[in-house]
Image (tube, grey):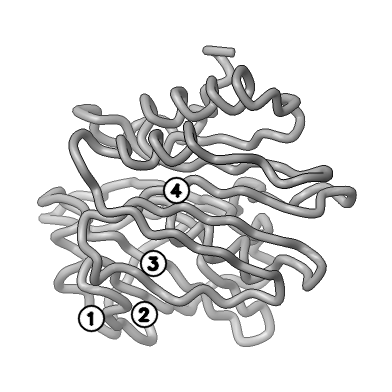
């Protein structure tokens, strides 16, 4: 690692270099496997490509400090010079379709690096409406984007992502063509997805959803898009 710094009280940014020539970063919001040495073992987890500077060969990863698990323990003590491995390529991220004029984001703290990465890449003629649920108000950050960004930060209240689900149920979609991006706990993601498809009537091809974790399930599958529930 070439640098480590605290972005917010619950988000640690690591910048790493190494054998990254030809590495496929997957685009904005892409995710990939990280292999970390923890207590003499190798722990594998899925993380977002926060940024990849191909010319400089620098990969940026934001590690959320969500619980007292092995990766959180590693991130709390990470230091320049520490080593870890990544998968050979990242899975594709998210880029709105050419006809979209707005994009609505529903995310919790785990999905915050992905949302920030996507916003970084949005064009100036795009409107982004962002709802993010956080457990600590100190984790609110400034988004960088050429697009017009309207961000609402929701303090966690009740079960995880309950405030996010309530926000989805009260939102009114903007006029014109647009898309919805959802990234949060698996059960809440499905609830938001059902509302967006059913009550708001958004076509399936304009909905992009992924579970970033599942309550009481360690290392939940990163293939869970909720499409099996409709």
Q: Earlier in the sequence, mark 3 or mark 2?
A: 2
- N-terminal of the pair, mark 4 or mark 3, is 3
Mark 1 → mark 2, Cα distance in angstroms: 7 Å
Residue topped by disc 2: 1
Q: CA distance from mark 4 to mark 3?
A: 15 Å
Q: Secondary structure at mark 1?
A: loop
Contact (Cβ within 8 Å) of mark 1 with mark 2: yes
Work out how far the residue at label 3 is from the one at label 1, CA to CA, in angstroms: 14 Å
Residue pointed to by mark 4 = 107
Q: CA distance from mark 1 to mark 4?
A: 29 Å
Front disc: 3 or 1: 3
Q: Is residue 182 left or right of residue 35?
A: right
Mark in front: 1 vs 4:
4
| Front in this rendered view, residue 92 or 131 | 131
Please report the residue visible at 53 percent of the width from the left and 50 percent of the height from the top.
31
Question: What secondary structure is marked by label 3?
Answer: strand
Quadrant location of residue 155?
bottom left
Q: Give the mark nearest the N terminus, 1 or 2.
A: 2
Marks 3 and 1 in Cβ contact (< 8 Å) = no
Identify the element where label 2 is drawn. loop
Q: Residues within 10 Å of mark 3 (few under 14, many from 20)?
A: many
C-alpha distance separating marks 3 and 2: 13 Å
Residue marked by disc 3? 62
Image x and y of residue 100, in percent = 82, 49
Q: Quadrant of residue 196?
A: top right
* Mark 1 and mark 4 residues within 8 Å of each other at the beta carbon: no
Q: Which residue is mark 1?
A: 79
């Amino acid at each position: 690692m070439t640098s480590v710094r605290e972005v917010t009280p619950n988000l640690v940014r690591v910048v790493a270099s190494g054998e990254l020539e030809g590495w496929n970063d997957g685009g904005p919001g892409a995710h990939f496997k990280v292999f970390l040495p923890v207590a003499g073992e190798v722990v594998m987890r899925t993380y977002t490509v926060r940024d990849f500077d191909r010319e400089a060969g620098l990969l940026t990863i934001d590690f959320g400090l969500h619980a007292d698990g092995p990766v959180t323990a590693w991130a709390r003590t990470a230091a320049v010079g520490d080593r870890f491995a990544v998968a050979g390529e990242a899975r594709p991220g998210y880029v709105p379709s050419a006809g979209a004029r707005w994009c609505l984001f529903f995310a919790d703290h785990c999905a915050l690096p992905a949302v920030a990465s996507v916003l970084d890449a949005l064009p100036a003629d795009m409107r982004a409406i962002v709802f993010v649920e956080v457990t600590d108000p100190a984790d609110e950050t400034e988004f960088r984007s050429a697009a017009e960004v309207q961000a609402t930060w929701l303090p966690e209240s009740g079960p995880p992502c309950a405030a996010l689900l309530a926000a989805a149920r009260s939102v009114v979609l903007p006029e014109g063509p647009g898309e919805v991006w959802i990234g949060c706990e698996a059960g809440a993601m499905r609830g938001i997805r059902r509302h967006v498809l059913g009550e708001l009537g958004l076509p399936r091809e304009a909905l992009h959803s992924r579970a970033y974790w599942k309550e009481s399930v360690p290392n939940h599958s990163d293939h869970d898009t909720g499409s099996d529930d409709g």
